[in-house]
Amino acid sequence: MTSDQQRPDPEAPGQQGDFLTTSQGARLRDTDHSLKAGARGPVLLQDHHLREKITHFDHERIPERVVHARGAAAHGVFQSYGTAEEVTSAAFLRKGAITPTFTRFSTVLGSRGSADTVRDTRGFATKFYTEEGTFDLVGNNIPVFFIQDGIKFPDIIHAAKPHPDREIPQAQSAHDTFWDFVSLHPEAQHHTLWNMSDRGIPRSYRMMEGFGIHTFRLIDQDGRTSLVKWHWKPRLGVHSLTWEEAQMVSGIDPDFHRRDLAEAIDAGSFPQWELGIQVFPDNEEQSFEGIDLLDPTKFVPEELAPVQLVGRLTLNRNPRNYFAETEQVAFHPGNLPPGIDVTDDPLLQVRLFSYQDTQLTRLGGPNWNQLPINRPHAPVDDMLRDGYGQQDIHQGIAPYRPNSLGGGCPFTAGDADRPFTDASVHIPETVKNRELSASFADHYSQARLFWTSMTPVERQHIVGAYSFELSKCRVPEVRRRQLECLARIDADLCQQVADALGEDAPAPDQPLAEVTPSPALSQLGSRWPVDGRMIGLVVGSDQDRAELDAVLGWIDEHSMTPVLVAPHGGSVAGHPVDETFATARSVQFDALLLASDPVATPDPDQKADAPAPSGHDPRITLMVEECWRHAKAIGAWGQGRRVLDEAVEAGPGVVEDQRPTTVLEAVTELLAAHRVWERFTPELPATGSTDPTARP
């Protein structure tokens, strides 16, 4: 506001005035001193500004989510391809329909202050603001869950959360109570195996798959129904961190994933996913190829039911305020538009109650859906009144039906008005009981399917994860019981983990399942766009300007992000320095390029009695060695080649040439496969096809 005559727009963003005011708009002369009885006297209760300021501060935190507390989010749009029109009447899936969205990613176990790169399941929840009401697709980056019945949800979370006596360990499952639960609860073994795989430590939210977990029911224009599972397929492919990287990043940059998401959007490298569906006949058994579609611990391999792509999600705008949007956004799997309905999955059925119930406490009452981030983009007339947090000014005297005093309004919708219609599903005659279908009883065949579908390097990582986690268990019986579970999945897996623990591997007490591997489950073997990849570029103070201009321009033209690393801050050859040798670490980059061999400079964090640096700067040598260990592409030209000669051996993924362009082309080709895994597993196919890929 620039004039006393102007009135603020109630729909405009808050905090827009020219003057500091109270919450009611009264301008303030002073906010640095409380009202006292004299300069040295006691503070007066009369000081209404002090009381308002302190009271609001005292209450500015709301309860964090019990699970998925640590999150990052972004606004976006979803554009439908129209390929789902045959199976659903949902308007946002009609050809060409464009729908605003808000997507939140999260870890499950940790508090809001925990690190991003812990080994954990990730949430992947998208709010579609459709013209027919909000649709919340609330899923994870793993297609199965730990439990089959929602009544067990408090148990798995209590077991996985920090021990209640010491409140440790934070944001991890490497402790006795978690493994005690899953070793006693075999249905949890499948999800646990996914979590121990590379899926548990994604490289980026931008490179993470998403799944609706449950089976849903779609209804077409004629009322015919199909069963479906939802999939999010990232345009950049599915990629992960190595375990050492994940541990390093937790200390170096605990905000790694949220920073990566926000900076990619700021840079215009908008993350994209395609939404897909697996479609199944809605038969009475609600099963497909012997797989019970109501069992949330099971998935359907894509080789049996291909994923049909139905639209594209693009995240293109960061939140303006973390609390107002990312923290206050509230999802609910019961938020469904016409054309989509739920099934009798016993985990989903409990979630339909739990999500609504939790918002009452977390967001202070039943009107959480009126917060701007949760507000539908469709007209609302719900006849609900009052309650904590009520923001609407309701009019009329007849919030009930039927009525005559309000002219009979609001009216119920007829068929032509596209109302939400619950699918008419036959329920066989039965009796009330507390049990699950016998078809839920197989807990190991799909876990074995997942294991057999992994490449050697992925299996190696799974063995390492189990070995680390179980070594943190102090109770021998817990370790032994989990080894017995692994023996029912695969003898080799069990033997390798037992060897790492220094224990004997138990023999399986039941025949191992005969399974057909699903190549679609492996993250390796394909090639993906390199958009948004972070390229560390090491330069010296005397860097040639023309060469640097050309290299930075080439990286930018290929939609990657250069990070200029120099001995000092400020600028080098006319370009601002992004990181210094004191602040840069290899885990920040997807590939490392050496344009120079900078002379060693004093380390401000140098340890006592450490020798004075000479020759190559040891911090750059360390970065190169770490990139080698983490199977990242490394390139060098000119004087930068001297660093490679001392730091790493010649081999796959190490590229050097006198011409920067030759190195850039080869490194980009290597990046399309994410990592150079054949550096350690020669039996894998080569990830780079452009020479040179190894040093001469």
Image (cartoon, helix red, strand yellow):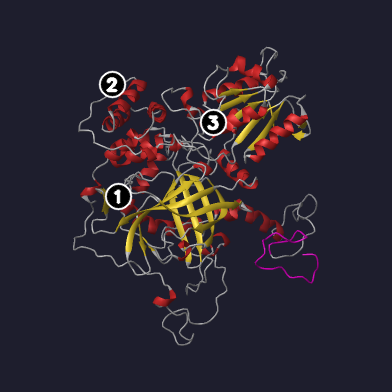
Give, as a single range, the part of the protein colored magenta. 1-23
Q: Which residue is label 1 attached to?
A: 295
Measure the C-alpha gap from mark 3 to mark 1. 40 Å
Question: What secondary structure is found at the residue carrying circle 1?
Answer: loop
Q: Which of pointers 1 and 2 indicates the residue nearer the eye?
A: 1
Above or below residue 178? Residue 335 is below
Q: Residue at x 68, y 62 (%)?
A: 23
Magenta-drawn stretch contains 11: yes
Q: Badge 2: few (under 14), some or many (20 or more) residues near its Cα, within 10 Å? A: few
Query: In the drawing, what numbered circle is on residue 670?
Result: 3
Kind of residue at badge 2:
Asp
Kind of residue at badge 3:
Leu
Magenta-drawn stretch contains 236: no
Q: Is residue 155 visible in the rendered structure shown here?
A: yes
Above or below residue 598? Residue 489 is below
Measure the C-alpha gap from mark 3 to mark 2. 41 Å
Q: Residue at x 75, y 56 (%)?
A: 35
Query: In the drawing, what numbered circle is on residue 478?
Result: none
